[in-house]
Amino acid sequence: MTQLIINADDFGYSKGVNLGILESFKNGVVTSTTLMTNMPCAEHAAKLAREHPELGVGIHLVLTCGSPLCKDVPSLVDDQGVFRSRRELEKVAEPDHIERELTRQVEAFFSLGLKPTHLDSHHHVHSHGKVAPIVLKLAKQYRLPIRKVSDDPLHSTNREVRTTDLFLSDFYGDGVTKNGFLQVLERGAAVETAEIMCHPAYLDHNLLTGSSYSLPRAKELVILTDPEIKDWIRTQGLKLISYREWKV
């Protein structure tokens, strides 16, 4: 039986994002989420998570959105004190600054009264050459699975940490349709363990003014809570889990 993790990214970005993710969990097919500890609504997200302990919550490591938690990581920020772009990050970020900030984000997650289920990252920065060794170190230190950074079933981030057989990121942008999501589910059903990424949300001011990916999130929310999607998953015999329930 395929074990399927449907993970909603960006928990903590805004209250609209937080509430959309919770709705997709309570009345839809989302089983897991990952929290951005550096964002303004991280505490609101943590409160929701504590009220719904059955929702799997991991850490969404951030180096390209908002501001760092550390004050002494100058290579990671621009003149305004916010994180640099992905392209700039690869060029100028110093590894010791990356490690200091990501370690602080993990510590901040625990300080919110939560126990993480796994690690992933905003804009998949844990696949970058400078970042990957640090995230692997954190994963081994805390004994956490990591989101696979390739959708090739033969690819493994590192044999010392756990990853699903498949990671699917197609439910995004133009791929946000009901038929598109069913196609993604079919691909996931072909392996033993798969993770599907999603970004459901209710639209609010912070999301509309701060993110280049906003309107499709509302459409994702509708699809992820469509009863026909849940029925299809059940008829196919897929087991919806979070990383917490994942059995190798």
Image (tube, grey):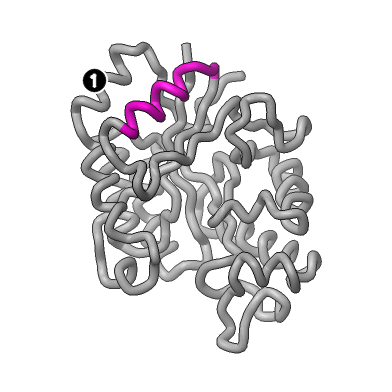
Front residue of 86/115: it is: 86
Q: Residue lying at the far left in this picture: please name it.
A: 227
- Reply yes or no: does residue 210 show up in magenta: no
Vertical arrangement, residue 81 with respect to residue 219, above or below? below
Q: Is residue 219 left or right of residue 90?
A: left
Picture coordinates of residue 83, whole percent (x, y):
59, 74
Front residue of 178/51: it is: 178
Q: Amino acid at mark 1?
A: Asp
Q: Secondary structure at mark 1?
A: helix
Front residue of 193/92: it is: 92
Vertical arrangement, residue 242 with respect to residue 111, above or below? above
Give the quarter of the image for residue 29: top left
For the point 75% across and 73% down, the residue is 92
Vertical arrangement, residue 39 with respect to residue 233, above or below? below
Crowdedness near tag 1: few (<14), some (14–19) or many (≥20) residues, C-alpha within 10 Å: few
Picture coordinates of residue 24, whole percent (x, y):
29, 41
Q: Which residue is mark 1?
A: 231
Give the quarter of the image for residue 248: top right
Q: Is residue 97 left or right of residue 13?
A: right
Most frequent secondary structure within the magenta stretch? helix
Instruction: Give the tally of numbered discs.
Output: 1
For the point 50% across and 53% down, the residue is 113
Vertical arrangement, residue 247 with respect to residue 36, above or below? above
Q: Which residues are magenta?
A: 180-192
Picture coordinates of residue 116, whole percent (x, y):
56, 45
Q: Residue lying at the far bottom in this picture: please name it.
A: 79
For the point 50% across and 32% down, the residue is 195
Q: Is residue 81 left or right of residue 72?
A: left
Picture coordinates of residue 210, whole percent (x, y):
38, 72
Give the quarter of the image for residue 53: top left
